[in-house]
Image (cartoon, rainbow, N blue to C red):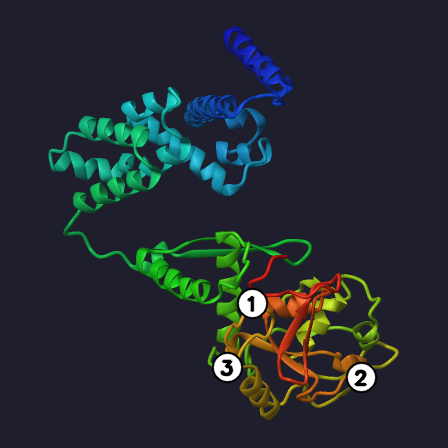
Amino acid sequence: MCSTGTGEALAVLEAAVDALAGESLDGLGDHQHLERTARLTTLRNRLEAELARTVRRADTTQAAEHDGLKSMRSWLRSHARLSAGDIGRLVRVGRAVDQLPAVATGFAAGAITADQVALIAPVAGVRNQAEAVGQGIDLAAVDRLLAEVAATRPHAELAQVVHHYLARLDPDGPEPDPTEDRSLTLSKHADGSLSIRGELDAVGGEKLQAALESIVQADRPNGDTRSRAQQQADALVQLADNALAAGQLPILRTVKPHVAVRIDLDDLVDPAAGPAVAEMGFGAQISAARARMLACDGSISRIVFGPDGHPLDLGRSHRVVPPSLRRTVEHRDGGCVFAGCGAPTHWCDVHHFVHWADGGETSLDNSALLCERHHTKAHHGFRVERQPDGRWHTHRPDGTEILIGQPL
């Protein structure tokens, strides 16, 4: 149970936060908004410093045993509902400020953030401290320098300083195995979307950045309003598309890796079929409209089920767009035909103007090359058409035409 003093201080703090939340932001000028943001940032840093100090103390005294738990990591996960990443950072920060008094002072004053302390934390590691003592390095001076850089310089510069110090600390040490610094976690949500979290070593990160940047820079259509994060996410999906389309990835149990979708034929051809009627290979559920889009340039396999749910007949795989037709469409279109795009042919699907499930022919006249982003738009209200003179026209869902270089 909290001491009287601590309880009173927390009560005052809670009341102050309530008062802040009750203040109206209407009528504040730009300067006042910025000043409020700066002061709240400082206060957040101070609160995180106090939280780290408290968690560190609770960890060393095994306070979690009071609630029947083995460690503060367990307590924070169950009682505070923090993620594993947040818990790990909080524990590292608490240990670091125990060893670096200057950094701890700056943190407590609000001049240093928790992210910066986590970045500095390896310096306070037992092995690195022992190495520094063995080399006669003044740890107090290092502590003061890091605190000053953290409080006055950009985050990226602090990262460079920490990296330089650790590299110089053991210049003759063995070159680390890059695979030890790599990790990738894919967390699937209920709707099938993925959250990606990972770490790459310097060389691995450079390779990924080079690949993504090449796609980002090659895909910059007029009027592009995507954020940098959206551009990089699209580039990552395009990178996967390119690798799958090349057909050179390792074989998975005698089958080339591919995007698989299972859907009832009735749902596939019904324009009114709703969401979550199709299931993908890794378990995600998607709408019939999305399945129709994927089927534009895919291979279709027919499976007939009996009344007991067991398959009776597995029909031959039928490629909707044969290679010969695709080559012809590529030669004619030269890339994505959506107004303002022009993505290269190997980024594109062959889109059916009239979907084959609705009776549309798999023919040159019924086909157009569209990149993934614009193929999606063509299945959600946008329309592309080719005039007899060979010119392409793109229309918005409201029927207006997208005219390049002219006002909206």
Task: Judge depth for marks 3 and 1 and give the one in front.
Answer: 1
Disc 2: which residue:
359
Q: Earlier in the sequence, mark 3 or mark 1?
A: 3
- Determine the CA span between mark 3 and mark 2: 30 Å
Total number of numbered labels?
3
Q: Contact (CB < 8 A) between labels 3 and 1?
A: no
Residue at the limit of the structure toward the right, as seen here = 307
Mark 2 and mark 3 in contact (Cβ < 8 Å)? no
Q: Amino acid at mark 1?
A: Gly
- Res 1 quadrant in image: top right
Q: Nearer the viewer, residue 83 or 13?
A: 13
| Badge number at residue 247 | 3
In this view, 259 is above or below 168:
below
Query: Residue 71: in sight, yes or no?
Result: no
Q: Of discs 3 and 2, which sits in the foreground?
A: 2
Q: Are marks 2 and 1 in contact (CB under 8 Å)?
A: no
* Numbered label attached to residue 172: none
Q: Residues within 10 Å of mark 3 (few under 14, many from 20)?
A: few
In the figure, residue 254 lies in which quadrant? bottom right
Quick one: label 3 or label 2, which is nearer the N terminus? 3
